[in-house]
Image (spheres, rainbow, N blue to C red):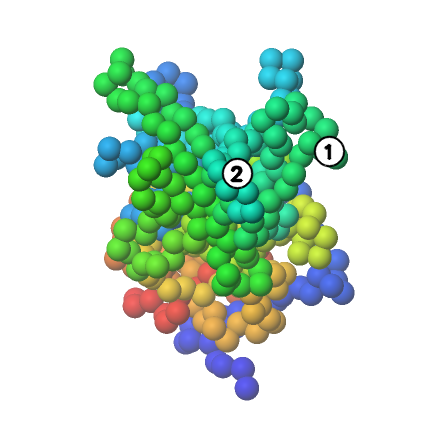
Amino acid sequence: MRPTPPPGEPDLNEGLPVKDCGVETCVLEEGARRSGPFECPTGQPNCTPDTNGLGIFVIEGGSYCFAADARSRFCPEAFENVPASDTSPRPTVRLTGRDPVAHQNRVVGYTLLGALQHPQSPGPDEVVRIHSIEAKGTELTVNYCPWSSDCIDTATQVFHLQGEDLQRLKLRATLPGIDGGQRRAVVFEISVRLRPEGSGRVRKYDVLYREPGRPWVNHCDSRGSDAAGRNATAFLPGLRVDSVNAAVDFIPAWTTIGCESGSIVTCLDWGYTPWDPDTGGDDRIRSHVFGSCLQAKRAAYFVGQGDFKSYTENGTRFVKRDAYGLGRDANNQVSELRTLEALWSPLGAVCLNVENRRVPGIPLPEGLYGVPSCARPPTWTPTGKLATGTVNPAPH
């Protein structure tokens, strides 16, 4: 028997029906649009917003940065494939992210080289060129070529590493010194190692780094938060996620790197992949719901209005439902979604029921930047295709 809604609340089963896209035509309205990447306003020279946007790449309070001399030196966000050109005759791969020391937290990239171990052949590692790094779904592939080759002919010169073989390769990135030598140049070695466990939806890895000769360190560090132990990494192909406002850009040459405690990998774990799981191809509806999930997980209600704050706390539970039944364990019933908090798009909350927000004690901005309350009875909107609710009705 279907449970009765709380007093005064409409029946969400009636107001928010789920479509079965296998038998129904599912269309995303033209009014739906993505959030744009964050750009520093013109004339603002010291624009250095916090990276991680409160929970995007790693849980709020955690770190996804490589450290040197006991401070963050580089925060990796993606592998970027760079094709051969007139100025660079061979394809290369850059480790791209934010450099909080040398570049005022702006996005920069450092070219990767490789050292390949041959278990059957004793001796030093073979120095190799990195041709490209890509993912199909969340399965990572590193393509490399011998140092002596021009790395162009993919049929005869390019070789591939996947799965457990990835641990044979050490990637290397060199960060230049800055401040007239006051801060030294740093070489980081990087190792990617497949984890044997993981859900069927998402392959998990350990991404480790070190300065040569020093112990390996996991680059995902939850720093004693409620996500302790959740330090695996997963990869997102063909997309760039902005580390300030979680805007998603389609960039085929990029493979995004995310920690499992952050919004990127959590949304993948929840079943909100931006690609069609049957074909692996881009899917506009799934991409929209994925972008919405990035904001909903962090309670970033007002991203579209330029407020990048997260209005929740680590460990706060909430429930969710989408208009298409895409999420893990999704179904047509909403017995668990008893109190509607908000409808979501990639721009944040489309509507917000303030009395039902997941952490009532966090003050909200006056006027809510014009974000309205959700309709009663609730209905999906042209852009609001993901719903969240509190586990128990919030106190009034």
Task: Give coordinates of residue 287: x percent, y percent.
Answer: 60, 48
Residue lying at the far bottom in this picture: please name it.
Answer: 1
User: Relative to 9, is 387 above or below?
Assistant: above
Whether residue 154 sits left or right of residue 271 in the image: it is: right
**Number of other residues with Cα within 10 Å of mark 1, as a class: few under 14, some 14 to 19, many 20 or more:** few
Q: Which residue is mark 2?
A: 116
Task: Give coordinates of residue 390: x percent, y percent.
Answer: 40, 66
Task: Give coordinates of residue 5: x percent, y percent.
Answer: 46, 76
Q: Which residue is mark 1?
A: 156
Between residue 359 and residue 152, name the one nearer to us. 152
Q: Are marks 2 and 1 in contact (CB under 8 Å)?
A: no
Between residue 62 and residue 24, name the one nearer to us. 62
Give the amino acid type for the residue marked by disc 2 in the picture. Leu
Q: Secondary structure at mark 1?
A: loop
Do we see residue 276 in this rendering? yes
> Which residue lies at the image location 66% right of the left edge and 56% below the top edge?
277
Q: Earlier in the sequence, mark 2 or mark 1?
A: 2
The number of numbered badges drawn on the structure is 2
Whether residue 182 sits left or right of residue 112 in the image: it is: left
**Number of other residues with Cα within 10 Å of mark 2, as a class: few under 14, some 14 to 19, many 20 or more:** some
The quarter of the image holding the C terminus is bottom left
**Cα–Cα gap, marks 2 and 1:** 18 Å
Give the amino acid type for the residue marked by disc 1 in the picture. Thr
Task: Give coordinates of residue 392: x percent, y percent.
Answer: 37, 71
Between residue 226 and residue 41, name the one nearer to us. 226
